[in-house]
Amino acid sequence: MRDVIVTADELRGVALTTVLVGAFAAGWGISGSVALPGLAGTIVLLIVLAVTLALVGLAITCMRAASRYPGGSGKLPNPFRTRDYQLAVLAEIIAIPLAGRLLTMAGRPDAVMPAVAAIVGLHFFGLIRAFQSWRFAVVGAAMVLVALLGLALPPAVSVGSSGAQLGLRVAFVGLGCALCLWAGLITMIAPVWRQLGATGPA
């Protein structure tokens, strides 16, 4: 092997993050796709599933590659066990059902999805120190922006001569959040992938 740049611990971390974030992105993407009418919804759903499967494949590749690299220094704490991560997730778990309940009581159930997107986006700011990466701030800010723009859109519009209903707000927020999460994953995976190629067996 050439000079080692990545470690087994880093590869496993990338794999775990890819699976977790990819699963949430799939949830957002599926929610957005089902708001599209007819064939468009089916096509977008298939794209979401294809991207999700590709991410799972990348995660598996990273896990398999980890066996060929040293474990790492062991000095960095597991970010999923840090107080910052736990507090951010706890706040998210409390805020989402609370926002859903309050908006529903206020007669604005159509605003629940943008509110959830904003809460999820804000929770990423709590992960910056846990993962020691400002990537989470960028993804979080993008999701909050998607949520705000979604609130400016009508909940639904009629399209085509048949008058089919397009859940515009849900489609925009769901697919927009999926794209934000996918983009964040790409910025994480791409340099690791390049390093794997550079440090692989000669």
Image (cartoon, grey):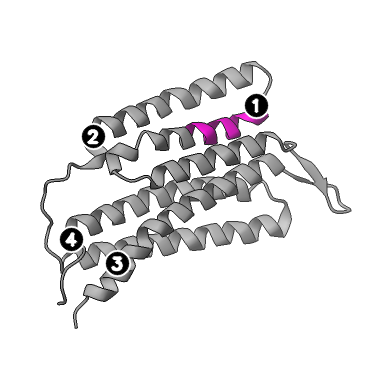
The disc labelled 1 sits on which kind of residue?
Pro
Would you call the spot at circle 3 few (<14 residues within 10 Å), some (14-19), or many (20 or more)?
some
Q: Which residue is mark 4?
A: 7
- Where's residue 167, x and y in %? 71, 42
Tell me the distance, in whole angstroms, between the alpha carbons under discs 4 and 1: 46 Å
* Amino acid residing under circle 2: Thr
What is the distance, in whole Å, between disc 3 and disc 1 at their CAs?
Answer: 41 Å
Q: Relative to 68, is 24 above or below?
A: above
Provide the residue designation for mark 3: 61
* Cα separation between marks 1 and 2: 34 Å
Asked whether the beta carbons under mark 4 and mark 1 sit within 8 Å of each other, the answer is no
Query: Which label's residue is closer to the chain start, 4 or 3?
Result: 4
Please give left or right for residue 61 compared with residue 40 in the image. Answer: left
Q: Which mark is residue 109?
A: 1
156 displayed left or right of 27: right
Name the residue: 46% across, 33% down. Answer: 122
The disc placed on residue 201 is none
Where is residue 154 drawn, in percent x and y?
75, 36
Q: Decide: is 98 above or below 141.
A: above
Q: Crowdedness of circle 2 by 10 Å Cα count: few (<14), some, many (20+)?
A: some
Residue matched to label 2: 82
> Would you say the residues marked 3 and 1 are in contact, meaning their CB atoms lie under 8 Å apart?
no
SS majority, magenta: helix
Q: Is residue 131 magenta?
A: no
Q: Is residue 12 left or right of residue 47?
A: left
Q: Quadrant of residue 155?
A: top right
Looking at the rendered structure, the secondary structure element under dot 2 is loop
